Image (cartoon, rainbow, N blue to C red):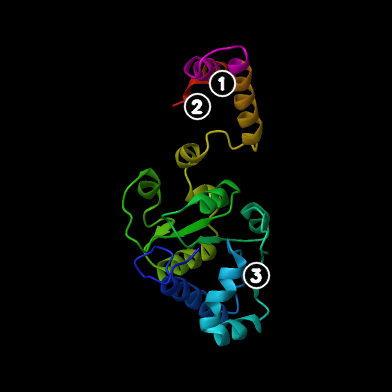
Amino acid sequence: NSSDEEKFISGTDRYIRIHTNILNKVINDPTIAIIFKPKRIKNFYKHLKKIQLLFEQALKTDRVIVLGSENNSMPPANVLSISDYAIHSNFSSATAGIESILSKTPTMFLNDHSLKEGKMYEYGKNEFIFDSLEQIWKQIDYLSSKKIKFEEIYSNQFLDFLDPYRDGGSNIRIYEYINDLKINLTKGFDKKTAINIANKNFIIKWGPDKVI
């Protein structure tokens, strides 16, 4: 999603800078292949018209793939299954990047907005959260050359912070909780009581450390 005004985090000028950097990297480094998975494929091609020649040059390397459609429902995990690393270009909106980590793909975040707060930033500063793409490329080169594994990048403490379950069963837990709420409301309980009962049942099944 992009605006023509630079003041917006996902502004067009920033979008072009990021993609220019990545495309040049592919062109100049034959060891790198890139899979783009834009959130909105129409915007992707719209903005890349401004660097069309560079994009076409990168495509000729046969190391650039663009995945997506106007009805794109492909989860990041599907793409990451064939990726060595992932780059999430917007640390201020990190959901897809977090999903990448939870799929056990080493993921770097671009934080060129100088967002310096929060637990995730504390965990990832200069480890997997960087202020520039140049720093990200340097880190990827380092991790690759040293053959550093996923478990060495992200601590269990950090992974527990992101998702204490990591069992692929979130959809089941959500369904059970919502169903519990529905049953309680159907029985005539007020909203607060229905929530309290659902929370109690959730704690009994999944543990008290899982409810804030």
Disc 3 marks a residue whose amino acid type is Val
Q: Quadrant of residue 136?
A: bottom left
Verify whether residue 111 appears in magenta: no
- Who comes first in sequence, dot 3 or dot 2? 3
Q: Give above or below for 186 relative to 139.
A: above
Marks 2/1 in contact by CB < 8 Å: the verdict is yes
The x and y percentages for residue 2 are 47, 66
From the image, tell me which residue sits under label 2: 210
Task: Report which residue position mark 1 lands on.
Answer: 202
120 vs 44, nearest the viewer: 44
Front in this rendered view, residue 141 or 182:
182
Mark 3 or mark 1, which has the lower sequence index?
A: 3
Measured as percent of width and height from the top left, residue 118 is found at 35, 45
Magenta stretch in the rendered image: 184-197
Classify 147 as above or below 104.
Answer: below
Can residue 191 be found in the magenta stretch?
yes
Q: Which residue is mark 3?
A: 66
Mark 2 or 1, nearer chain start: 1
